[in-house]
């Protein structure tokens, strides 16, 4: 796969060499193959912007393959800017690298180079987000980390109080610090009050993140307001979805979005045997989780009457034990498709569009 800014620069690549880079946290192993497929050179380079720029800046240009990982985003953008044809291998799909009996960083770099030289499609190449989109996505990830930290502290405080034979009142996470403080046993105030102050501060930080998310959505991604017309889709889900897709035109069909977010069942078919598998859980885990939360709201007590709800209720009524769980995943999958379609067409969302046109389908 060739990145967009690679094609825009009009750069030409000599297909004589192929480079495989096994990115490490501190040192990266590099293997260079010549036109005949023989190893021409092996070396190590520091996994820093300065190290890669210095080593590859004057290097002969060619096809360069690396695996997805912590450093693959910025490294792929840097190397593409230097003039290399960068192929980012999907580590989840290329099992050949991790399943070998003899696995070393040196051999991994060589295998990446050989696969890229044979056919880049064997690497199931992925496209990383652009730097501005990645920076905006960190707002969502930071908020998610703050919520996890607050939840862990609330659970700790509740558990500590429960061990003293009492319980704290039920309340929302936002109100926990205020309502729990007067109910603390006197023996635990010295140890737990500081945690309540931290929980209260985290709550304020989370609210600030919520305001920041709405501000960024309004200023940079106005399409999120259109996606939020779907009942249950809030600011976080809309922004996370837009940042994950980035360019809706790169998907030829809206139906591909379900598989892109790992909401489609894995296929395991051999001969006459076709096993029923769980969903792949590939792609962006945060977006998949948010889509499932939206589906839970749609099917919950506060959910409105929509095509999603009618279809899911019909499936649950004729299903077995796991019917509700499967319907939940199916609604999340359909939601990912509908959001993409609304984004592409700009149509106004009609909650009962399918029921009006094809009553028998709901």
Image: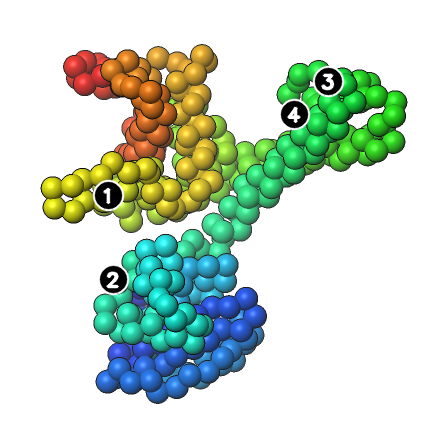
Q: Residue 149 lies in what quarter of the image?
A: top right
Between the residue at mark 4 and the residue at mark 3, the CA separation in whole angstroms equals 16 Å
**Tag 2 or tag 3, which sits nearer the N-term?**
2
Label 1 – label 3 distance at C-alpha: 48 Å
Q: Position of residue 23 (x, y in %)?
A: 47, 68
Can you name the residue that lies furthest to the front here? 101
Label 1 sits on residue: 267
Circle 4 residue: 173
Q: Residue 192 location in percent, x, y?
A: 80, 31
Res. 208 in view: no
Horizontal side of 116 relative to 360 (left or right) equals right
Which of pointers 4 and 1 lies earlier in the amino acid sequence? 4
Who's the residue at 33% across and 72% down the image?
A: 111
On the image, the x and y values in percent for residue 264 come to: 29, 38
Observer-side mark, 2 or 1, equals 1
Which mark lies nearer to you, 4 or 3?
3
Identify the mark nearer the N-term, 4 or 3: 3
- Earlier in the chain: of badge 2 and badge 4, it is 2
Instruction: Please provide percent x and percent y for residue 64.
Output: 36, 72
> Residue at position x 23%, y 68% from top?
119
Vertical placement of residue 290 versus 318, above or below: below
Q: Which residue is mark 3?
A: 167
| Left or right of 28 on screen, residue 319 | left
Residues at marks 2 and 1, CA–CA distance in whole angstroms: 20 Å
In the picture, the quarter occupied by the C terminus is top left
Could you tell whether 311 is left or right of 222 in the image? left
What's the mark number on residue 121?
2
């Amino acid at each position: 796969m060739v990145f967009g800014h690679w094609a825009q620069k009009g750069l030409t690549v000599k297909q004589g060499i192929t480079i495989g880079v096994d990115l490490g946290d501190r040192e990266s192993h590099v293997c260079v193959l010549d036109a005949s497929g023989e190893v021409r050179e092996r070396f190590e380079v520091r996994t820093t912007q300065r190290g890669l720029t210095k080593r590859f800046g004057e290097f002969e240009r060619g096809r360069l393959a690396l695996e997805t990982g912590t450093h693959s985003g910025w490294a792929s953008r840097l190397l593409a800017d230097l003039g290399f044809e960068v192929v980012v291998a999907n580590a989840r799909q290329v099992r050949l690298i991790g399943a070998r009996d003899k696995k070393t960083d040196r051999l991994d770099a060589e295998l990446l180079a050989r696969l890229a030289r044979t056919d880049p499609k064997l690497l199931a190449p992925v496209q990383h987000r652009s730097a501005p989109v990645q920076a905006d996505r960190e707002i969502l990830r930071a908020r998610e980390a703050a919520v996890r930290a607050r939840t862990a502290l609330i659970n700790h405080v509740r558990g500590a109080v429960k061990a003293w034979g009492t319980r704290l009142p039920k309340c929302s996470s936002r109100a926990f610090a205020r309502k729990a403080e007067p109910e603390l046993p006197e023996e635990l105030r010295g140890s737990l009050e500081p945690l309540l102050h931290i929980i209260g501060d985290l709550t304020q930080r989370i609210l600030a993140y919520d305001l920041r998310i709405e501000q960024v959505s309004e200023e940079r991604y106005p399409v999120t307001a259109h996606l939020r017309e779907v009942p249950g889709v809030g600011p976080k889900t809309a922004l996370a979805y837009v940042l994950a897709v980035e360019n809706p035109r790169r998907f030829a069909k809206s139906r591909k979005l379900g598989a892109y977010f790992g909401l489609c069942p894995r296929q395991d078919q051999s001969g006459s045997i076709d096993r029923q598998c769980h969903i792949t859980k590939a792609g962006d885990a945060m977006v998949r989780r948010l889509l499932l939360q939206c589906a839970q709201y749609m099917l919950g007590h506060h959910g409105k009457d929509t095509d999603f709800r009618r279809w899911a209720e019909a499936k649950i009524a004729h299903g077995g034990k796991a019917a509700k769980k499967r319907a939940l995943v199916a609604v999340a999958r359909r939601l990912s498709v509908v959001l993409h379609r609304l984004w592409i067409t700009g149509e106004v969302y009609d909650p009962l569009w399918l029921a009006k046109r094809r009553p028998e389908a709901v």
